[in-house]
Image (spheres, rainbow, N blue to C red):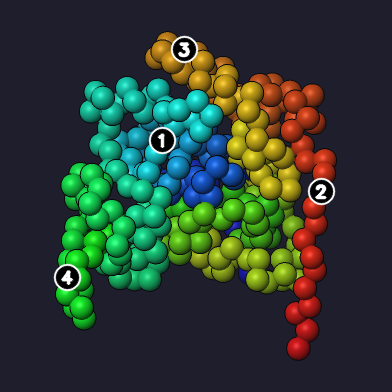
Amino acid sequence: MPPSKLLSLSEAVQRFVPDGSAVALGLSLETAIPFAFGHEVIRQNKRNLTLIGPISDILFDQLIGAGCAEKVRAAWVGNVITGIGYNYQRAAESRSITVEHHSNFTISLALKAAAMGVTFLPSLTALGSDILNENPSITTMSCPFTGKRLSAVAAIRPDVAVVQVQRSDTSGNAHVWGCLGITREACMAAEKVLLLAEEIVSSDMIFRDPNRVLVPGFRVSAVAHVPWGAHPSPMPGYYNRDHEEFLRYKNRSKRPEDFEAWLKSDVHGVPDRDVYMRRCIGEERMQALAIRNHSIAEGVDYGY
């Protein structure tokens, strides 16, 4: 039986996310964003992080506002309902953070290159765009076979990839479904992988559907049991998107003093995810967000 990798979220962050880490997160685009991880990072006052992701939503904005980040390598940082993130905008305009502009596809290519063990991948993307002019990790090259002009996207190898999954065993063999975005690329590119699981289940359950396993368990450094860890983003099969919370955050991050009040009440004022959900969100809203109309996938036959 493989050893258990189950840790508390607090211990996992403390052990595997030192100051200065390059962290890939928010990899499924608008779903399964590991907000509980980000809030624990803020509580532990981590500093000088590089944040890596595609459309990274308000989690990046929260980490930037809390002073945890010194660099962002992303396609977009903001609130998908209301527009750009206020903390990100303030930090970018004051140049208190370094911003490396990407598209969703160039971030994907950069992580894919690292996962393959190569230093870059050629592409046609970004040619003729401002990204090519502003991002030093993307340049141009001539195809060695045709001479055609190509873009060359340098590999990005995160120190750690953080993923909220639906279920995992204690060894890190996890099932995830819905939009995966660039989750697999990031997990295979990163030095370490941290999983936050809605449920901890038996290995027998995982191995009954092996094609749904995210990455081999030996690639995973730690598993934390964190129900509702992706709230306010949606988690397929578990809960819907909390639009009310995204609108509330917009209003509570417009001014630095508003954001500080939000940090105090919703992050520093709660010790963990469970208390956050019960105190800041409440049982009634949790019941309203919980999935009621289930849609079970068709079963398959793995017989041979």
Name the quarter where the N terminus is drawn.
Answer: bottom right
User: Residue 45 versus residue 26: which sits nearer the camera?
Assistant: 26
Label 2, secondary structure: give it: loop
For marks 3 and 1 on the same chain, the one whose residue lies earlier in the sequence: 1
Above or below — where is 26 with respect to 261? below
Residue 43 location in percent, x, y? 49, 29
Res 77 label:
1
For marks 2 and 3 on the same chain, the one whose residue lies earlier in the sequence: 3
Q: Residue at x 59, y 44 (%)?
A: 31
Amino acid tagged 3: Asp
For marks 1 and 4 on the same chain, the one whose residue lies earlier in the sequence: 1
In three-dimensional space, the C-alpha distance between marks 3 and 1, rounded to whole angstroms, equals 19 Å
In three-dimensional space, the C-alpha distance between marks 3 and 4, rounded to whole angstroms, equals 51 Å
Q: Residue at x 32, y 22 (%)?
A: 90
Quadrant location of residue 64?
top left
For marks 1 and 2 on the same chain, the one whose residue lies earlier in the sequence: 1
Q: Residue at x 34, y 25 (%)?
A: 89
According to the picture, the residue beneath numbered tag 2 turns out to be 294
- Between marks 3 and 4 in the image, the one whose residue lies nearer the viewer: 4
In three-dimensional space, the C-alpha distance between marks 1 and 2, rounded to whole angstroms, equals 31 Å
Q: Is residue 111 visible?
A: yes
In three-dimensional space, the C-alpha distance between marks 1 and 4, rounded to whole angstroms, equals 32 Å
Amino acid tagged 1: Val
According to the picture, the residue beneath numbered tag 3 turns out to be 258
According to the picture, the residue beneath numbered tag 4 turns out to be 142
Amino acid tagged 4: Ser
